[in-house]
């Protein structure tokens, strides 16, 4: 039967009502400690929260969406969605998505989508504050995180947080023929006004910042004894290009099926603009080269996965190799360092004992692979026992090779 316009129309709607708060009751146990609650002395740079840091904030939000899809022709499916969101502290927005799927032949089709996005600042980002001891170029220094709406932040000409906005485009190809299928999708994601945790603002950057510290670091002042201040702020615009290629082939054998899968993922993110609101604090201080390196190179840009699963009816056994590309970071004043690409191997199995009971187990990271050691680029931290760094790795450090067993019972 051929589909004609209007023969099949799908639609959906939904709504969300949400309320969030930060310490709405003013519970003193959340902002102070005494007696037996005091943490045992030791190597701890965070002293706890003082009563002066207590806050009581809340947010109410409402969202509503509509979603519909329709065959315009027998081979062309078009979908559209709209979402309205309203936040009592950040205003309202309307975002949307258009997508289409066109079947060219029985085996080949193309698909694409375009959408906009919106993310209101998190309650933690908008209201978090603390005083702690941190590392500044290898030296201990008191750091205060300011709330974006704090008077001290306003004095440095920072605006209160605003929403992040994005545009998303993707196009893909889908092909299947018998036991083989492949999909290739290419996408572009641009995000404006991304919220970031700033670098350290301290004396010596310019005369305006020196005067700011002069006013507030005197005995009993708001920043008495403080060397650095930081805050969450809308700091950067980013552009991300990526592609996902997934191939699957099923081989039918006498004892069952063997499913092979090969996938490749590429992701390249660039900081296209640093656009903070302050005219006093330089962009290079708000978002420095180390932070840019972390967001651009701190995650593997390439990942390849090759797996084979043997399906024996009630049994299945899977072998998987995952190759992670290299990553580069620079942390706490250290030199930029690159951790080389690594490949991990996993073997897992599952036994469907009954309709209710499943048993599974496996070995993860079979060859006991670890990231490269930090080396001299990690000085002085490598001399203090930090072998691998801590900002980012090609894969989770965890604990090398891991074993697990799991039982599942379905009621």
Image: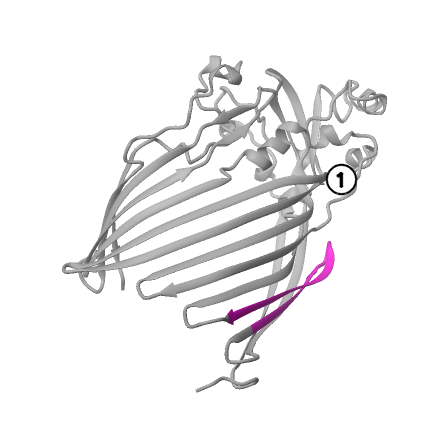
| Quadrant of the snapshot with the N terminus | bottom left
* Residue 287 picture location, percent across and down: 69, 32
Image height of 197 relative to 38, above or below? below
| Residue receiving disc 1 | 275
Q: Nearer the viewer, residue 390 or 68?
A: 68
Of residues 38 and 300, the one nearer the viewer is: 300
- Residue at the left extreme? 254
**Horizontal side of residue 299 vs 64, given as left or right:** left
Residue 55 placement (x, y as % from top left): 68, 42
Judging from the image, what secondary structure is the residue with disc 1 in? loop
Asked if residue 96 is among those painted magenta in the image, a careful observer would answer yes
Identify whether 357 is placed above or below 278: below
Using the image, determine if residue 364 lies above or below residue 187.
above
Picture residue at 49% right of the left edge, 61% below the top: 173
Residue 32 on image: x %, y %:
59, 33
Q: Position of residue 275 (x, y in %)?
A: 76, 39
Name the foreground residue: 240 vs 368. Answer: 240
Q: Give the extent of the magenta segment.
A: 78-102
Q: Nearer the viewer, residue 21 or 401?
A: 401
Answer above or below: position of 166 versus 2. above
The crowding category of the residue bearing disc 1, from other C-alpha atoms within 10 Å (few below 14, some 14 to 19, many at least 20), is some
Rendered-image quadrant of the C terminus: bottom left
Q: In this rendering, would 118 be left or right of 45? A: right
Q: Is residue 95 visible?
A: yes
Q: Is residue 128 visible?
A: no
């Amino acid at each position: 039967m051929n589909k004609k316009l209007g023969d099949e129309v799908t639609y959906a709607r939904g709504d969300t009502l949400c309320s969030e708060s930060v310490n709405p009751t003013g519970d003193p146990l959340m902002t102070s400690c005494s007696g037996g609650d005091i943490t045992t002395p030791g190597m701890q740079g965070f002293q706890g929260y003082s009563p002066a840091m207590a806050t009581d904030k809340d947010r109410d939000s409402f969202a509503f969406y509509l979603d519909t899809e329709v065959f315009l022709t027998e081979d062309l499916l078009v979908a559209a969605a709209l979402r309205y969101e309203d936040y009592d502290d950040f205003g309202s927005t309307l975002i949307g998505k258009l997508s289409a799927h066109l079947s060219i032949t029985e085996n080949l089709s193309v698909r694409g989508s375009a959408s906009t996005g919106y993310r209101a600042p998190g309650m933690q980002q908008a209201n978090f504050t603390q005083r702690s001891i941190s590392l500044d170029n290898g030296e201990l220094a008191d750091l205060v995180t300011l709330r974006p709406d704090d008077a001290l932040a306003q004095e440095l000409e920072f605006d209160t947080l605003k929403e992040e906005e994005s545009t998303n485009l993707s196009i893909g190809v889908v092909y299947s023929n018998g036991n083989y299928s492949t999909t290739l999708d290419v996408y572009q994601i641009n995000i404006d006004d991304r919220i970031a945790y700033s670098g350290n603002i301290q004396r010596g950057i310019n005369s305006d910042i020196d005067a700011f510290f002069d006013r507030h670091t005197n005995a009993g002042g708001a920043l008495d004894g403080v060397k650095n201040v930081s805050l969450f702020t809308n700091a950067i615009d980013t552009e991300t290009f990526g592609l996902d290629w997934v191939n699957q082939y099923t081989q039918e054998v006498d004892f069952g099926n063997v499913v092979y899968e090969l996938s490749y993922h590429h992701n390249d993110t660039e900081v296209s603009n640093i656009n903070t609101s302050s005219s006093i604090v330089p962009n290079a201080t708000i978002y420095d080269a180390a932070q840019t390196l972390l967001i651009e190179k701190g995650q593997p840009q390439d990942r390849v996965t090759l797996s084979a699963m043997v399906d024996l009816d009630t049994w299945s056994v899977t072998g998987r190799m995952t190759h992670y590309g290299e990553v580069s970071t620079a942390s706490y004043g250290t030199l930029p360092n690159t951790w080389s690409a690594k490949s991990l191997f996993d073997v897992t199995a599952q036994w469907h004992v009954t309709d209710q009971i499943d048993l599974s187990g496996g070995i993860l990271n079979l060859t006991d692979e670890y990231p490269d050691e930090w080396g001299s680029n990690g000085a002085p931290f490598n001399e203090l026992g930090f072998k691998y760094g801590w900002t980012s790795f090609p894969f989770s450090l965890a604990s090398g090779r891991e074993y697990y067993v799991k039982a599942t019972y379905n009621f």
